[in-house]
Image: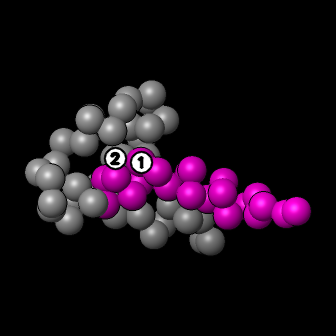
Amino acid sequence: SGDMADDLTPAMQEGKAAKLAGKTVSANPYRAGSQESADWMAGYVHDEVEQNMDQPEED
């Protein structure tokens, strides 16, 4: 399928789920500096980034 979720790593999916659950970024369970931590954060802000892309700023 063309679902974006297919491209997310497990850590990214966890981060996205945490955001949806209303948790803060401090809920990131991974060690700072690890790839999983980076993926978790990417998942956490995933929807925000998509929204910004969907709504280009026009003068």
Magenta stretch: helix, strand or loop mostly: helix
Q: Is residue 7 visible?
A: yes
Rendered location of residue 23, percent (x, y): 38, 29
> Real-space Cα distance between discs 2 and 1?
8 Å
44 horizontally vs 35: left or right: right
25 horizontally vs 50: left or right: left
Specify whether residue 51 is painted magenta: yes
What residue is shown with label 1? 44
The amino acid type, in three-letter code, at marker 2 is Glu
The amino acid type, in three-letter code, at marker 1 is Tyr
Question: In the structure shown, which secondary structural element does the residue marked by tag 1 occupy?
Answer: helix
Question: In the structure shown, which secondary structural element does the residue marked by tag 2 occupy?
Answer: helix
Rendered location of residue 47, percent (x, y): 56, 51
For this orientation, the residue located farthest to the top is: 22
Based on the displayed image, in which of its 4 quarters is residue 1 positioned? bottom right
Q: Is residue 13 visible?
A: no
Q: Tally the marks.
A: 2
Task: Identify the image's colour scheme: rainbow, by chain, secondary structure or one colour.
Answer: one colour
Q: Residues within 10 Å of mark 2 (few under 14, many from 20)?
A: some
What residue is shown with label 2? 14
Looking at the image, which residue is at 66% across and 57% down? 52
Based on the displayed image, in which of its 4 quarters is residue 2 positioned? bottom right
8 horizontally vs 25: left or right: right
Figure quadrant of the C terminus: bottom right
Rendered location of residue 34, percent (x, y): 15, 61
Specify whether residue 31 is painted magenta: no
Looking at the image, which residue is at 31% across and 53% down? 40
Looking at the image, which residue is at 41% across and 64% down? 8
For the magenta stretch, what is the residue range? 39-59
15 horizontally vs 59: left or right: left
